[in-house]
Amino acid sequence: MAEKDSVREQIVSAAKKRFSHFGYAKTTMAEVANDCSMSPGNLYRFYPGKLDIAEAIATEDYSKHLEHMRKLAVTPGKPAPQRLHDLLFEELRRTYHKLEKDPRAYEMALVISRERPEFANWMLHEERKILVELMDEAERRGEFVPENKDFTAEMIQAATMKFRYPQLWSKLTLPKLERELEGVLCLLLNGLCPEAQAIAEQRREQQKREAAA
Amino acid sequence: MAEKDSVREQIVSAAKKRFSHFGYAKTTMAEVANDCSMSPGNLYRFYPGKLDIAEAIATEDYSKHLEHMRKLAVTPGKPAPQRLHDLLFEELRRTYHKLEKDPRAYEMALVISRERPEFANWMLHEERKILVELMDEAERRGEFVPENKDFTAEMIQAATMKFRYPQLWSKLTLPKLERELEGVLCLLLNGLCPEAQAIAEQRREQQKREAAA
DNA sequence: AGATTGAACGGTTTGTTGATTATTCAGTTA
DNA sequence: TAACTGAATAATCAACAAACCGTTCAATCT
């Protein structure tokens, strides 16, 4: 089976080159097979179809990103609101730049999200787990503690939907998106009510003092 | 000019019938012209093009909706969070039902939002004005008062983007959308911090008592 | 027998042609 | 001369065939 895995890696590697060079649609299975010195039919012993190869690439890529995000979620020395801020901004910037600079990535994102909606669900689910980790950590440190963490994570995602696949929905530039995300985050953290904002302000002060001590 | 306006109304009325019966694409300018007993060319003295007729219909329709929303925004006897709640739910339900029940409306929404992005901007802008009115009224009544109302309105829209053209983005059912909107709204009103939530809770109690008195 | 091949199949895309239709405008009407 | 017409125009769409490509599987190889 180690044998089989190495072949799978070879296939993914060949496909990755083709996809990023010529695009998903313009890459044929025959070409990928050729790059791996095998027949087209043989590819299907390793992957059920072309889309699954694309999905494997996307999974690998997003998993790396998730690891990075997980670190941000529990960074020591940073208060919870800051960690949440870093997390959401990282997500926004990453996808923005990825889709911005290369049209191939954009094409693959489109295809996968159209053809494999489960994949988008999986991404959301994984990110939600990280949000929950962030809140667990917050609880451990005595920072904010929403009563129902899973639900809260879901709602944070719903409220920041606009910033998740930025260029699929709005045609806003990164600076505008960043400004909006900043504002939404502020609203989420503090709420609309001014008393809550005053309290949040107080806590920020206190945290600063604690950090200084 | 009153003459001209009545012809414009006639055109819009004929087009409305055709569009809702056969769809935008399957309606020809010649047909609309015929219904108005005029030549196709003559239509262009009243509207610059087919899309502009569709836009006129959409504008008329949305304007009615806006009036209704404006009433909700300043309903006497309801606290500001409730009014905001009513407003956003009204918006969600209206568009959901509209797009759900007739495919013609869905087609027109697609065409207009693709071909005339300014129109979507106009809608957002108008709705934002209503949100500001809601906050002005809140201030008058001594309810919550965000410092920068325009900005806050923008952020409320950003955070509730997902619920604005529900079926263009997610394929969620109305009950699921409602549950999420409820959650997001709660987060927006109270923030993530539990102290703020406690205060919000207190205020709600107080308002109940006031209302009872 | 299990792995691999590559020709065959069917669905999709591409390219082409002919019609349809939004839009324009020279000409007609009142 | 201002309002209107309808044929001309150019752009888009629909239909059809050919080519292509993802996928399968009977045959071949090891």
Image: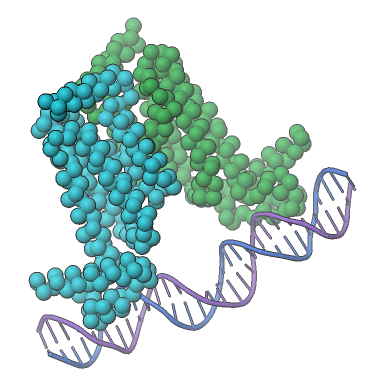
Chain colours: A green, B cyan, C blue, D purple
Looking at the picture, how far across and down is residue A167, in whole percent? 41, 46
Identify which residue is drawn at 75% across, 38% down.
A4
Q: Nearer the viewer, residue A111 or B127?
A: B127
Residue A189, compared with residue A95, is above or below; it is above
Q: Nearer the viewer, residue A64 or B52?
A: B52
In this figure, what is the number of numbered marks?
A: 0
Q: Is residue A58 left or right of residue A198?
A: right
Determine the residue located farthest toward the top in the rendered image: A213
Identify which residue is drawn at 26% across, 59% down.
B58
Can residue A85 be seen in the rendering of this structure? yes
Q: Nearer the viewer, residue A198 or B31?
A: B31
Residue D13, compared with residue A210, is above or below; it is below
Identify which residue is drawn at 38% across, 42% down.
B175
Q: For residue B105, what is the image quadrant?
A: bottom left
The quadrant of the image that shows the N terminus of chain B is: bottom left
Residue B168, compared with residue A67, is above or below; it is below
Q: For residue B149, what is the image quadrant?
A: top left
Looking at the picture, how far across and down is residue C25, in whole percent? 25, 82
Q: Is residue B170 left or right of residue B63?
A: right
Can residue B154 be seen in the rendering of this structure? no
Identify which residue is drawn at 23% across, 69% down.
B13
The quadrant of the image that shows the C terminus of chain B is: top left
Looking at the picture, how far across and down is residue D28, in whole percent? 88, 57
Q: Is residue B153 left or right of residue A169?
A: left
Residue B173, compared with residue B196, is above or below; it is below
Looking at the picture, how far across and down is residue D12, in whole percent? 41, 70
